[in-house]
Image (tube, rainbow, N blue to C red):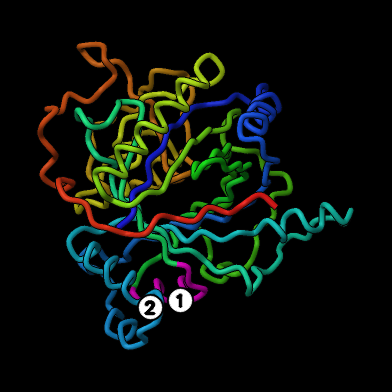
């Protein structure tokens, strides 16, 4: 199972153009502008674990069969919020580039497969991981049938968002700036294959989230190399970008059986309505609430704790019992797109 390892920071709208220019020069690559639809799915009944249709999926013996089996085994032990991600760049930018007026809705191209994405809660802080680096297990399954498979497995669509992003790649590292548009917190099942219109919508917040990200084999040596490479990049960009220390629970997509009481934030409540309180206070160190484009959930910067180190007080040599991160599985390294 691969790991996603990343740095994250915040870029204000006022600094967007300068940040893109810096990243273009730093990577010696022109930017790629994208729009991605992000739909969140949760089980209709928390007592239903995994994919009830797993037997039918395993009979296919296709290229994604092993991934569905792996994800099913995870969901049997613990329910999670899943994402379906779809590249809708052509549908959004195509009419604009041609000078045509955007239609209220378009149709998702059959050549653009949905990607079913699962991500685990990030590893807890310890001596192996610098506090400004986040790492977590991920599974991504490209499958045009993903919405139908989740519907057949009694999952429901909880929210509909669109991410606007700019991307650069250099030395197996992805650099991206992302902002999010909220389409609906109660989407209709009939709109799964429709491209939502962004006309009249404003981004959530007056900022972009900056990511410096790697996908690596889940081996100690390869992960340590990624840590070293990201730390070197952080040092090179020191004074230009600030990569923050984030509370790992802001990226927690697990669903607990006991729902929380609303914390007054519409987006946070909508995505965490079935979650047990994770101890993150809605009061942040800054005046703004931020939405993570990775999870498209409420992201809360970790405020200073009692000892002032901005790090969870987790013993350095111990792992959370539920995280089970002491061993790594092997998988192949992701091949990033090359500049054309």
Where is residue 69 drawn, in percent x and y? 28, 72
Figure check: 199 above or below 190: above
Is residue 145 covered in magenta?
yes
Secondary structure beneath label 2: helix
Q: Which residues are the magenta region?
A: 142-153
Residue 20, percent across and down?
Answer: 66, 31
Q: Which mark is residue 152?
A: 2
SS of the residue under disc 1:
helix
| Side (left or right) of 302 relative to 278 | right
Q: CA distance from mark 2 to mark 1?
A: 6 Å
Up-down: is 157 above or below 32? below
| 174 left or right of 135 in image | right
- Mark 2 and mark 1 residues within 8 Å of each other at the beta carbon: yes
Q: Of the numbered discs in the image, which one, if any, rests on residue 148? A: 1
In percent of the image, x 50 and y 17: which residue is there? 238
Which of the two residues, 284 or 241, is positioned nearer the viewer here?
241
Residue 333 lies, in percent from the top left, at 40, 55
Quadrant position of residue 252: top left
Q: Residue at x 16, y 50 (%)?
A: 327
Check disc 1: other Cα within 10 Å, few if <14, some if 14-19, many if 20+: few
Q: Position of residue 29 (x, y in %)?
A: 67, 39
- Asked if residue 97 lies left or right of residue 17, the reply is right
């Amino acid at each position: 199972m691969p790991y996603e390892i990343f740095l994250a920071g915040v870029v204000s709208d006022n600094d967007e153009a300068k940040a893109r220019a810096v990243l273009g020069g730093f990577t010696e690559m022109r930017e790629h502008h994208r729009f991605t639809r992000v739909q969140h799915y949760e089980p209709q009944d928390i007592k239903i674990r995994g994919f009830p249709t797993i037997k039918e999926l395993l009979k296919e013996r296709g290229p994604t069969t092993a991934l569905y089996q792996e994800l099913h085994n995870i969901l049997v032990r613990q329910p999670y919020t899943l994402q379906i991600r779809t590249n809708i760049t052509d549908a959004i930018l195509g009419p604009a580039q041609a000078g045509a007026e955007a239609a209220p809705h378009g149709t998702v191209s059959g050549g653009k497969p949905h990607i079913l994405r699962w991500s685990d809660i990030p590893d807890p802080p310890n001596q192996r991981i610098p506090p400004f680096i986040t790492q977590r297990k991920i599974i991504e399954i490209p499958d045009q049938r993903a919405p139908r498979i989740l519907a057949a497995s009694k999952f429901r669509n909880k929210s509909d968002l669109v991410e606007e992003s700019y991307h650069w790649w250099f030395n197996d590292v992805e650099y991206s700036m992302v902002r999010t548009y909220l389409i609906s917190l109660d989407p209709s099942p009939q709109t799964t294959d429709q491209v939502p219109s962004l006309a009249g919508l404003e981004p959530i917040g007056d900022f972009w989230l900056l990511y410096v990200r790697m996908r690596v084999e889940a081996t100690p040596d390869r992960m340590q190399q990624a840590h070293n490479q990201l730390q070197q990049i952080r040092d090179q960009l020191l004074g230009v970008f600030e990569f923050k220390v984030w509370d790992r629970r802001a990226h927690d997509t697990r669903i607990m059986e006991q729902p929380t009481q609303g914390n007054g934030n519409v987006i946070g409540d909508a995505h965490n309505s079935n979650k047990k309180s994770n101890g993150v206070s809605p009061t942040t160190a800054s005046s703004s609430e931020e939405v993570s484009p990775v999870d498209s959930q409420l992201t809360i910067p970790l405020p200073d704790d009692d000892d002032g180190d901005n790090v969870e007080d987790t013993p350095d040599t111990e792992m959370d019992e539920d995280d089970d991160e002491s061993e790594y599985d092997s998988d192949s390294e992701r091949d990033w797109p090359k500049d054309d």
